[in-house]
Image (tube, rainbow, N blue to C red):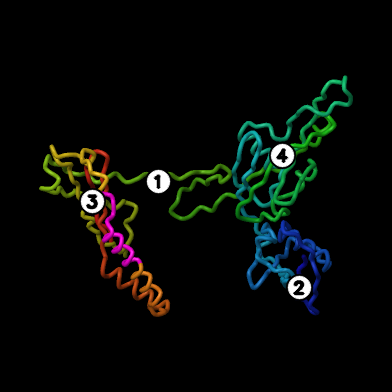
């Protein structure tokens, strides 16, 4: 498969780029820039039908037909460094998730997770291949291999020089798989490359919003926000029969927080849900104590005929009804909502008590 990439200059330049289903838009951009002799591929992006294509998007997921025409335009956000959420899938430690800058290298990501989780990701050793039948199995270095879509990074040099932005991950999320490849040498021969100093993997600090805490939050550690549920309304119960009386719930009004003293606040009207609580009947037979014969569940011929006729009538009404526009359907739905503005829901608990509330 191939596509046509146009570069809007004078005169307009065009080139054909061969593609594969797993090729990313970043790889297509690099190939197009090489064909058009453009020096900096990172400063450009592809546009299809006036929509910008994400660099990490695969060709098979972009819904682009064979022979389509794409435009190569200048990426105005190329110099902006954004955060990328990375999920590192390992064989032993499961999935590790954190946030990094788009300029972070793969090696920095491995060292970050290794330090944070007390793991061994870049200094792993294993059993190598025997040279002959009588020799001992040597202990060799297990080379980490990062796989992202159809891209494989198999050497330490590649891992230390390849950034997330070069892979096409400039924003959003991405999943990287970590495997290990058996080498022929011991770990001592790779220690110089492993201990080579590199930049730390630190994510961007979010800007401080007015009215929030002045302490900056480090986004490299995921923070989970837990919303505490509101306590249930207090219910006054009385020892009465379920069929005889109903006890209404006493709901305490919501209190306005002190920090919300702002002018021109429109207060929403309170909605009475009509919460009711039914106590179970005292001394009455339970539902499990009622035994019904099998004949109760058998349908008679008259009942079967009535069900069959009602289904046929509903199907005929559906097939013979006139065509309706979207405005007519919306008006019909609005009339239904006006006819039934309130819904009453009852929940029966295992102890046979019932709670009722109305919803608008």
Task: Tell me the quarter of the picture where residue 266 sits.
Answer: bottom left
Compare residues 169 and 355 and report the one nearer the observer.
Answer: 355
Q: Residues within 10 Å of mark 2 (few under 14, many from 20)?
A: many
As helix, strand or loop, the secondary structure at mark 3 comes to strand
How many C-alpha atoms fall within 10 Å of the one at disc 4: few (<14), some, or many (≥20)?
A: some
Sequence-wise, the earlier of marks 4 and 2 is 2
Q: Which residue is mark 4?
A: 179
Residue 46 in the image, given as x and y percentages of width and height: 70, 67
The reply, left or right, for residue 39 in relation to residue 246 is right
- The mark nearer the N terminus, 2 or 3, is 2
Residue 50 against residue 294 in the figure, above or below: below
What secondary structure is the stretch in magenta mostly built from? helix
Residue at coordinates 72% horizontally, 53% vertically from top-left?
167
Label 3 and label 4: CA atoms lie apart by 56 Å
Q: Which residues are magenta?
A: 296-311
Badge 2 is on which residue? Answer: 6
Q: Which residue is mark 3?
A: 356
């Amino acid at each position: 498969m191939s596509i046509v990439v146009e570069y809007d200059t004078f005169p307009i330049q065009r080139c054909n780029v061969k593609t594969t289903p797993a090729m990313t838009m970043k790889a297509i951009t690099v190939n197009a820039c090489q064909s058009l002799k453009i020096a900096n591929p990172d400063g450009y992006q592809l546009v299809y039908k006036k929509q910008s294509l994400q660099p990490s998007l695969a060709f098979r997921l972009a819904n682009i037909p064979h022979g389509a025409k794409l435009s190569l335009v200048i990426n105005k956000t190329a110099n902006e460094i954004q955060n990328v959420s990375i999920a590192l899938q390992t064989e032993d430690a499961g999935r590790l998730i954190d946030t990094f800058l788009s300029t972070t290298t793969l090696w920095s990501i491995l060292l970050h997770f290794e330090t944070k989780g007390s793991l061994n990701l870049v200094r792993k050793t294993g059993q190598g291949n025997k040279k002959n039948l009588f020799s001992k199995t040597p202990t060799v270095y297990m080379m980490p291999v990062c796989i992202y879509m159809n891209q494989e990074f198999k050497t330490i040099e590649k891992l230390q020089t390849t950034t997330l932005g070069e892979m096409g991950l400039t924003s959003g999320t991405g999943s990287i798989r970590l495997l290990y490849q058996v080498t022929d040498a011991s770990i001592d021969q790779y220690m110089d490359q492993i201990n080579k100093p590199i930049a730390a993997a630190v994510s961007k600090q979010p800007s401080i919003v007015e009215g929030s805490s002045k302490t900056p939050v480090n986004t490299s550690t995921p923070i989970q926000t837990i919303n505490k549920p509101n306590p249930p309304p207090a219910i006054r119960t009385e020892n009465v029969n379920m069929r005889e009386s109903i006890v209404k719930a006493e709901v305490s009004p919501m209190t306005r927080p002190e920090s919300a003293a702002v002018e021109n606040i429109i207060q929403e009207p309170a909605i009475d849900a009509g919460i009711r609580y039914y106590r179970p009947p005292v001394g009455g037979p339970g539902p499990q104590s009622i035994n019904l014969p099998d004949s109760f569940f058998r349908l008679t011929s008259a009942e079967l005929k009535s069900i069959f006729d009602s289904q046929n009538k509903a199907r005929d009404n559906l097939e013979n009804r006139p065509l309706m526009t979207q405005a007519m359907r919306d008006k019909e739905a609005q009339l239904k909502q006006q006819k039934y503005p309130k819904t009453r829901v009852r929940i029966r608990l295992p102890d046979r008590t019932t709670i009722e509330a109305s919803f608008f």
